[in-house]
Each structure stands twice: as C-alpha cells, then as structure tokens.
Amino acid sequence: MSNSRISKKERNLIKGAIRRVFSRSELRQEVIKRCIDKDHIDLTRPRVKTWCKCELCGTYIAKSSMVVDHISPVIPLDSSMEEMTWEQMIDRLWCDISNLQGICEQEHALKTKLENKLRRENKRAKLKSRSNK
C-alpha cells in the first residue's frame, strides 16, 4: 500500500471505507447470529430485545453493542498496513469464520490495547536490529 500518489490521510479513509463494508457483511452477521441468546432477558433493560453472549468472558450484551473481532488481527502484529497490499488486507478482513469471534466492547478494548503494545515492541525491535547493522 505504498502508492506515493495516495496520502496517509487518503489511505486511512480507504481503510475505513473497506472496514465499513465489512461491518455490513454477511460474514459479520453470521458471527453475531452465532452469539445471540434468545432465552436471556434483562428486566433492568426492557428496551433491549436481542441479547448476545461475549465469546470471551460470557457477559450478556445488547446485540447493538456486539463487536466482531478477528482472532488473528487483520494487520499482523509483526508488520504494518504499509507492508500489505489492498488484496491482502481484504483477504484477511473477509477471513474464515473460525477466525472471528463476537465479543463485548471491554474485551475488544483490552485485546486491541495488547495488540498495539506488541506492534510497538515489534517495531522497536525492527528499528534496533536495523541500527545494529
């Protein structure tokens, strides 16, 4: 994705557009459907009609709050988006359903924070190994 005619801002806009398309995909809907618990009722939140169960912590959450997460991240921990082609990004986004999980926002935030930390560490290690050469 290193086309010099596409600015960093434009690259991020394209990435966001591709992710928005995925958010409406049949694949994502299948994962959400897998997490729905038709028997769960929460009388403290009567407006919520459809409940899902987080596949990591087991917490019940409103369907509208369900996050579909890639178990193996779309952008690998040891590389960056700039090192990928658009086709690779799309292939990793529309992956096999076994690589997707329906999780709550709290679990997703924790997982994302850990992945970003690992990316930063990998980036530092790459820079250090380059400077030692």
Image: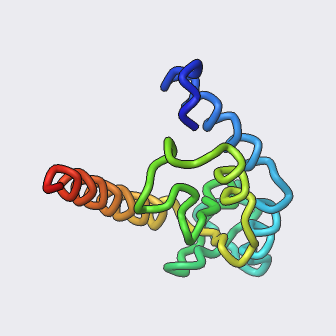
Tell me what residue is drawn at x 74 percent, y 66 percent.
Answer: 32
User: Residue most toward the front?
Assistant: 133
Left or right, 89 with reference to 12: right
90, above or below 70, in the image: above
- Residue 117 spot, x, y in % from top left: 29, 59
Above or below, comparing residue 69 to residue 131 in the picture: below
Q: Quick check: 2 above or below 113?
A: above
For the N terminus, give its image quadrant.
top right
**The C terminus sits in image quarter:** bottom left
The one of 91 and 17 positioned closer to us in this rendering: 91
Name the residue at the left extreme: 132
Residue 55, horizontal then vertical, whole percent: 59, 78
Question: Is residue 27 shown above or below 85?
Answer: below
Q: Residue at x 71, y 74 (%)?
A: 35
Q: Is residue 116 left or right of residue 57?
A: left
Frontmost residue, 81 versus 26: 81
Instruction: Name the image quarter holding residue 5.
Output: top right
Q: Residue at x 75, y 64 (%)?
A: 50
Picture coordinates of residue 121, whole percent (x, y): 25, 60
User: Which residue is rendered at x = 23% and y = 51% of the image?
Assistant: 127
- Return the x and y of residue 58 as percentages of the image width and height: 55, 81
What colouring method underlies this structural image?
rainbow
